[in-house]
Image: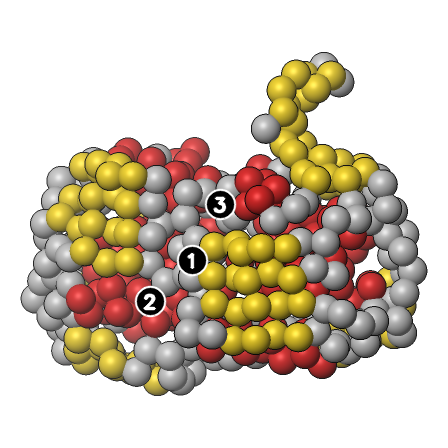
Amino acid sequence: MEKIIIKGGNPLYGTIEVSGMKNSSLPILFATILVKGTCVIENLPPIDDVTAAIAILKGMGAEVRNIDDTTVEICTDNVGCGTAPYDMARHMRGSYYIAGAELGRFGRTSVPLPGGCDFGQRPIDLHIKGFEALGARVDLDSGYIRAEADGTLKGTSIYMDVVSVGATINVILAAVLAEGVTVIDNAAKEPHVVDLANFLNACGADIAGAGTDIIRIKGVSSLNGVTYAVLPDMIEAGTYMIAAAATGGRLTVSNVIPKHLESVTAKLCEMGVHVEENDSSVEVWADAPLRPVNVKTQPYPGFPTDMNPQMCVIMCLAEGNGQLREGVWDNRFRYIKELIRMGADITVEPKVAYVHGGKPLKGTSVRAVDLRAGAAMVIAGLVAEGVTEISDIYHIERGYANLVEKLCAVGADIKKTVVSDGACVTAV
């Protein structure tokens, strides 16, 4: 079993470079199923979810060549429909994008129902609604999403009852080669939706309106291979911004798009943190006591749900009371019992956490209960008195590239250990 061990109390100083965006890497990788010829995808984050997505594509028959740690060459001409390896696909939430891509290319799909972090019910009813609107019959059978169209998928108008990133992306994938025009109303506006649309447009698609409420997709006959670089990861960037402020250090977070970080920047500034924006970086520092704030997570451009746990940590450090309201998922607050183990004073209701700040955090043994909660435990360990041991760190490594190495380079006392039979046998 691997653990992250942190001795807290060191302010972070220096520069951290952000990797490519996890949340757009997966749909872009699976979108290559729609493309004839070879794609070169650059700026991929070297994380476990990307490795798993590439392994799934290989298992489906794709030819993949790793050019370096962040660049792959992919040709999916020989991919077979319904061939996603069950055990790999069912453990990754993003594997459901195979359904939209297969349906778009083959007119049918058979994909294992996905896994991923447990935030309670995460239904795929809007995905099904979109596929059916395009002319497919959809069944959920024996742990699989199965869909098939009679002939060519037909463009149509689809209204999303709630804003859904996953459903918006899956409908785009299914519709890009469909006959006619598809209009998605109440579409998700997240940067990774825009990133996918930009990739597909570079391949020859005709997608307009990505990043707005209404996306228009005019079907094309084929897509061709391109070289494309994934956008930088705004959640990784936001995590390091909060780490800088929480530790009382001063970090330059580079390879970012500052506009994507506006909601995080606004809340940090409200807390008394300094944030200076540059063309492709932000500099963050705190030199005064933190003020309490109220936060509500919302779809983009609101405060991101994926920053909920990290924000909760820094709210624990502010003098006074704040509220953190979750506006996206039903079960996002499972990590709070780990913060309480560290001395945090938090009262939780189903959709809101009442944070009573100003009490020092103390190092202890905690778990990473999901990806972003794991990042929050790292931030908590960086500011806690004493030593923090974090277990179940495979969650963290699904979404953060070289996190330990990046934090070591800016002054953190952090290492990864491999534990066997209760004894540490190696340290990284």
Please give the label number shown on residue 318. none
- Residue 234 in the image: x percent, y percent? 49, 64
Image quarter of residue 101? bottom left
User: Which residue bears the numbered disc 3?
Assistant: 401
Residue sitting at x 26%, y 37%:
66
Would residue 382 be found to the left or right of residue 106 on screen?
right
Report the residue marked by disc 1: 21
Say which label, 3 or 1, has the lower sequence index.
1
Q: Quadrant of residue 128?
A: bottom left
Asked whether the beta carbons under mark 1 and mark 2 sit within 8 Å of each other, the answer is yes
Q: Is residue 200 above or below residue 54?
A: below
- Tell me the amino acid under the disc marked 2: Asp
Q: Position of residue 298 (x, y in %)?
A: 59, 76
Inter-mark Cα distance, 3 to 1: 10 Å
| Residue behind mark 2 | 195
Mark 2 crowdedness (10 Å alpha carbons): few <14, some 14-19, many ≥20: many
Q: Residue at x 15, y 63 (%)?
A: 203
Q: Quadrant of the C terminus?
A: top right
N-terminal of the pair, mark 3 or mark 2, is 2
Mark 2 secondary-structure assignment: helix
Front-lying residue, 3 or 29: 3
